[in-house]
Image: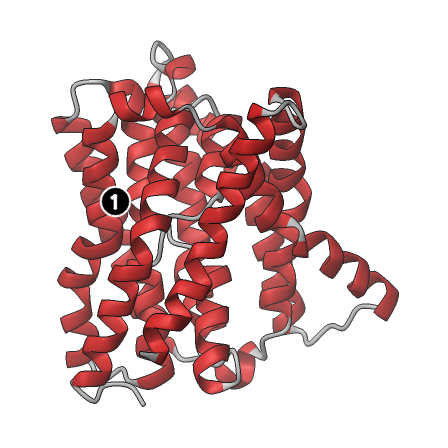
Amino acid sequence: MDSFIYSLNATIPIFLVMVIGNFLNRIGLIDRHFSNIADKLVFKICLPCMLFLNLAGTNIRKEFDTGYIGYCFAVTLLSILSIWFAARHLMKDKSMVGAFVQGSYRSSAAILGLAFIENIYGTSGMAPLMIIGSVPLYNIFAVVVLTLESNSTKTSAIEKQLWTAFLGILKNPIIIGIFLGLLASFFNLSLPHMLEKTIENLGSIASPLALLSIGASFEGSKAIAKIKPTAIASFLKLVGLAALFLPAAVWLGFRDQKLIAIIIMLASPCTPTSYIMAKNMNGDATLASSIIVTTTLFSSVTLTGWIFLARLLELIQ
């Protein structure tokens, strides 16, 4: 029951903030212009600050676990490539491929991973290691997939598309934030308190601002028209990947904090970042927001189910 209540506390407020964003848009308090500005602010400033601090606060040299990080990396890479391959060959509307792919694999790993483990064990524990193994790949492939599948590059030569994707990776603010966070952690660098507090304040508004923007931009009629890809992506994100890869994690001996972090990596709702990136990189923002809303709504049930199953099998304590 505790896991169920905590899962509701973690996901329902997220969904309600999106509902509030939609309501504020309907009464005219915020508009599409606000949403566009908020998206850019979150993408370029707030999210990079949040990821930087999460990683900078980890002692990589002391806590580094090659096998665990390798597992998170391999599973994330395999998931992305498999979903992308299937989407390119099976989806009739190619304009939806980029948003569908990243919506199917991108988890709220940085936010929910830390929150869940701190709630259960009182410390962030293995979450930063899971972030190292998965979140950079999330963002690198989001840039690559959205660039290669974007309508604006359909007629470009493959070399030009790949070069555009490579430049996009180098200039992506989220990837820069992750890279700087890893450097700060590896060299045990500490920022002046005033600067650290400033970055922390900017990072703390990333999620609520992104969620308000998603709600304000959500178009229900268009989302209903794309219910099939939304349903498939949501199933993969909440159930499919976990059902496929969790048994391997158990077989490899991952337990407690490590297993909880893997569950979050595989089965948490799609991160609001996917909407921000889709909108900023000519992807299908409507499909991206629909996947976020759907996975957030149902994750209170599915995440609770995975955690309950792990406890029932005495894999976590």
Residue 181 point in image, percent of width and height: 62, 62
Residue furthest to the front: 27
The residue that disc 1 covers is: 234
Residue 127 point in image, percent of width and height: 45, 72
- The residue that appears at 43% across and 56% down in the rendered structure is 12
Question: How many other residues sit within 10 Å of disc 1, few (<14), some (14-19) or many (≥20)?
Answer: many
- The residue that appears at 53% across and 43% down in the rendered structure is 211
Residue 242 point in image, percent of width and height: 21, 62
Q: Please state which amino acid type lies under the numbered disc 1.
A: Ser
- The residue that appears at 60% across and 33% down in the rendered structure is 39
Query: Which quadrant of the rendered structure holds the N terminus?
Result: bottom left
Query: Which quadrant of the rendered structure holds the C terminus?
Result: bottom left
Q: Nearer the viewer, residue 109 or 147?
A: 109
- Quarter of the image for residue 61 reads bottom right
Residue furthest to the top: 155
Residue 288 point in image, percent of width and height: 38, 33
